Amino acid sequence: MPEHLVNSSSDSIEPRSWFVYLVRAANGSLYCGVSNDPVRRFASHQSGKGARFFLSSPAVALVYTEACSSKSEALRQERLIKKLKKSAKECLVASALSR
């Protein structure tokens, strides 16, 4: 089965939700990624099983999530966010905190 489809309890096929997310590292830097379960992915970053990015400074907080319509849309958003300056990424974090 394609990875963007899952079986629900009623045996119908539904699209999965995908998210772009930001995680704050202990040194204050921000990591951007995509996942269909950002909370689970954050836990894997914290446990050292996620990205190598966190080898030098552990993941401390999931600070931003944005739902996307598909995995490809999440990947597009990730590319856009990664191009932003840190100050703009901090604005995204602040906007998430104010919601």
Image (tube, grey):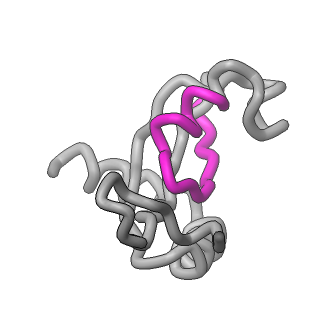
Check the image and report above or below for 70 versus 23. Answer: below
Q: Nearer the viewer, residue 22 or 15?
A: 15
Task: Write the residue at 76% across / 28% down.
Answer: 49
Q: Quadrant of residue 46?
A: top right
Q: Quadrant of residue 47?
A: top right
The residue nearer to you, when weighing 11 against 95, is 11
In the image, is residue 77 above or below residue 97?
below
Q: Quadrant of residue 28?
A: top right
In the rendered structure, which segment of residues is drawn in magenta?
Answer: 27-44
Q: Is residue 50 left or right of residue 80?
A: right
Asked if residue 22 can be seen in this view, the reply is yes
Residue at 17% x, 48% y is: 98
Q: Picture coordinates of residue 83 (x, y %)?
A: 65, 72
Percent across and percent down for residue 36 are 51, 55
**What residue do we see at 30% from left, 49% from top?**
94
Q: Toward the viewer: 20 or 96?
A: 20
Residue 31 belongs to magenta span: yes
- Tell me how many marks there are: 0
Point out the image quarter for the N terminus.
bottom right
* Residue 84 in sight from this viewpoint: no
From the viewer's perspective, tell me whether residue 54 is left or right of residue 11: right
